[in-house]
Image (tube, grey):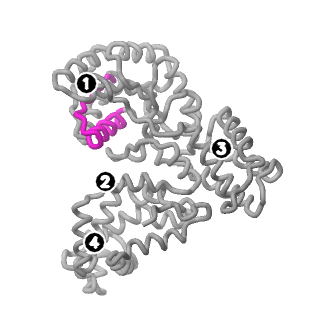
Amino acid sequence: MFNNLSDRLSHTVKKLRGQARLTEDNIKDTLREVRMALLEADVALPVVREFIDRVRNRAIGKEVLKSLSPGQALIKVVDEELTHIMGQSNETVNLAAQPPAVILMAGLQGAGKTTTAAKLAKLLGDRDKKKVGVVSCDIYRPAAIKQLETVAAQAGALFIPSHIEQSPVEIAAEALQYAKVKFLDVLIVDTAGRLHIDEEMMGEIQAIHESINPVETLFVVDSMTGQDAANTAKAFGDALPLTGVILTKADGDARGGAALSVRHITGKPIKFLGVGEKIEALEPFHPDRMASRILGMGDVLSLVEEVQRKVDQSQAKKLVKKLNRGRAFNLEDLRSQMLQMEKMGGMGGLMAKMPGMGNLSSQIKEKAGDKEVARMVAIINSMTPQERHFPDIIKGSRKKRIAAGCGLQIQDVNRILKQHKQMSKMMKKFKGGGLKKMMRGMQGQLPPGMGGGGFPRM
């Protein structure tokens, strides 16, 4: 998401470098390009107009600090205004209620409500240590109830059975009573979607809302629908007292218009972002961090939080101890690192949060993408345990067998062996304060405008 918008904004601010002051003349063309970039990203027109006006009013005549070029000063203004449009700060779900706290999921068919309900249950269970139950009030879509049962099991949430013979209001009321008996902390109610907004649908979900009085009513919307998402959210907001929005499919080929429009039009905060198909792929939405990612400056805070949450700390400590004892970094270790990376959303998810990664060419991103990670894991899986632990024994005949075993070429095997050697050399730097030196070295390679602030001082 935001790839095209990020590229366009990065390109436009480059034109201002070398100017002594931001004036009407030297930012006129830039603002025109920013406006076109936002419209191409499918941002709603009223949002674009307000954004451009706010940037212009703040930027014109603004004295540029000695340490900043005009381009960087404009980036700062744009960054702050993007954050303003998307909501200033993260607002999480409100669970301060007499248990069970009820969360009602609303939205159109195909937006991903059922999967998102399970993802939210997983997040609340893991992060907040809540005992979560889920129930489906969708008696219309074939296998909707069974789907929720399946994803609830993956999330480790309690599935509360329902039947198509029951009315949606009856299902919700009975589930609430059941949740009280089972002493659940949270009850997530999944509702039926429609292909379009209609009175019958709105009447049904209003009746459900009235019967269970949820503490949170979350509108789930597909981010790939652009400004239509904001218009649909407004229709739901008129019918229901929405408390927040969840944007799904943000990892797809979305242009980002929904994220920039929905808060402004509905007045409701975006609380979560769906970033993949896996049950863990739901992130709290931080407007300031998202603005940073749009401008190609990465999202180091989210990256650090994700590492702390998803990386197997015991496995990481074992690797550090092993390296400190002078033992080699072998292919089994490399495979473990690749699998850990997949837990964090793959290489694509990591690159989206790394400073400067937005400036890489599409060819480089493709070579370092998730498919390449899967290929590397497949090659290592085709090796024997002895070969993984002692890569130097892998010669001609072994390479041929390994390539045949994973359906790839000998050149691919050679490539991973070369990459392993390079990583082994890098891992040796972890000892004796080498990590600090390596991070400081990376600071010097950050793109202009980062000012070495992409990583914390060590």
Between the C-alphas of marks 4 and 3, the distance is: 48 Å
Q: Is residue 157 magenta?
A: no
The mark closer to the camera, 3 or 2, is 2
Which residue is more in the foreground, 38 or 181? 181
Q: Tell me if residue 411 comes above or below residue 185 in the rendering.
A: below
| Mark 1: amino acid | Pro
Between the C-alphas of marks 1 and 4, the distance is: 54 Å
The mark closer to the camera, 3 or 1, is 1
Secondary structure beneath dot 4 equals helix
- Residue 271: horizontal and vertical position, in percent? 44, 36
| Mark 4: amino acid | Gly
Q: Disc 4 marks which residue?
A: 405
The mark closer to the camera, 4 or 3, is 3
Is residue 413 visible in the rendered image? The answer is no
Sequence order check: which comes first, mark 1 or mark 4?
1
Secondary structure beneath dot 1 equals loop
Q: Please say if the residues under marks 1 and 4 sit with CB atoms less than 8 Å apart.
A: no
Secondary structure beneath dot 2 equals helix
